[in-house]
Amino acid sequence: MTQSTQIIDQISQAIGPERLLTGAEVHSRSAGIWRSDTIAADAIVRPKTVAEVSEILRLCNQTGQRVVPHGGLTGLVQSAITQPGDIALSLEHLNQIEEIDPVNRTMTVQSGVVLQTLQEAAEQHNLMFPLDLGARGSCTIGGNIATNAGGNRVIRYGMTRDMVLGLEAVLADGTVLSSMNHMIKNNAGYDLKQLFVGTEGTLGVITRAVLRLREQPTRRATGLAALPSFAALSKFLRHLDSELGGALSAFEVMWHNYYELVTTAPAKNTAPFSTKYPYYVLFEAMGVDNTLIESVLSQALEDSLIDDVVIAQSEAQRLQLWGLRDDVEQVFREGPAFLFDVSLRIHQMEAYVAEVNKRLGSQFKQFHNFVLGHVGDGNLHFCIGAGSDDEDTHKRIEACVYEPLAAIQGSVSAEHGIGLEKKPYLAISRNTNEIEMMRRLKQSMDPKGILNPGKVI
Ligand code: ZN
């Protein structure tokens, strides 16, 4: 009997066999979004209560059994990948919205609640949970917190970290660390919840959270601008943000090659402009109506910050504009492609993109690099293909993207995390002392190394 079989028996006795999946029920489940492999773990355990999570971890910790926490499996950096011998701990049955408090504008949830479900629950009270991303229908709040998800509204509302008031996590030994704070301000000592935000399940398993809600805006203005240059783009960002008084909630830039890809067949989107431009910005402002945005945009046209602009006149038009930005899957029609997520200061972006393309050109006879990004947050995404999806091609492309970041103190991960995929490049963005401190925290909180082993550090 292998170690994991013994533990699986003990877990089955502790929480009931119906909470366990083994064999084909595990190996037929996809390992994640856009992945072709399936889950390799020996079992998936699906606790329904925090006490059960605690008991599972206590049992696993006794024998050093490896545990990989699972949310919606929509991450992009192999943070939830399992191997034979692992136990996957899925929070899918810990999925209750426990309370919505409209007076204090908070929501208390269990970690397996799907993001879209809690967004819609907040809307019932004219409130909003501002985190929003493409995977909203499958990702879970626990996964969003564990990866400190970013998305499309960071410029106004911050990342997931900024939306979490309180958190409960179960430590490797089964201890339930409950920090379910409901207040916006609380400086009473260390902010322990931050140990679990963005640490990808390596320090504890998130079970519950208190989330900060915002007022649901009654007005919203959305448009798409065409710009002549990157210099104009960074001026346009400042112009919009200052004239809109902080209401700017999205500033999504599409480089011309990405825009042309998503506006030509077989893509089904229609091109809003008849002329081609170097850059396109999808912008959105919460709490602003079209009258204000029109005057702000006429000024931008007059100052030659933008060459042309369309403003959504209906919800259907708004969705059409977002459809351009969100049609990322078009990049795969040109063959295999790898997705990247990096962070750098805005003034360095134009030269950095040129440097990455120069390096790709020296490595590959043919490549394509579709560029888009949450430029208002200093975050770029590349979709790069060079004809093959083999590991060697991937590594050579990664080097072209990550190595130039070292000289400009950029980050190899803006919002996707590190997981397994970016672990070899962590030292580009974190110094030796920082990485040593991460190791010490891991050693102190999970001495047997059972939690999501091998990820991040
Ligand atoms: Zn993104």
Image (tube, rainbow, N blue to C red):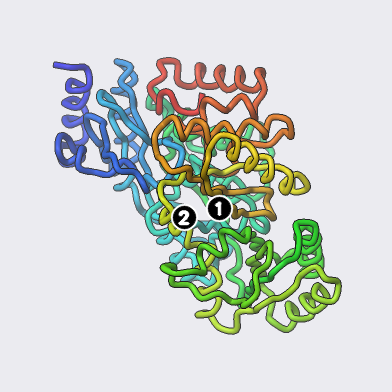
Residue 106 at x, y percent in the picture: 54, 57
Q: Residue at x 53, y 72 (%)?
A: 126
Q: Secondary structure at mark 1?
A: strand
Q: Which residue is mark 1?
A: 370
Q: Is residue 401 visible?
A: no
Q: Residues within 10 Å of mark 1 (few under 14, many from 20)?
A: many
Relative to 115, say whether 342 is above or below.
above
Q: Secondary structure at mark 2?
A: helix
- The verdict on label 1 being within 8 Å of ligand 1 is no
145 vs 371, left or right, is: left
Q: Residue at x 75, y 63 (%)?
A: 246
Q: Residue at x 63, y 66 (%)?
A: 282
429 vs 64, left or right, is: right
Instruction: Specify the farthest residue to the right.
Output: 303
Relative to 450, say whether 369 is above or below.
below
Q: Residues within 10 Å of mark 2 (few under 14, many from 20)?
A: many
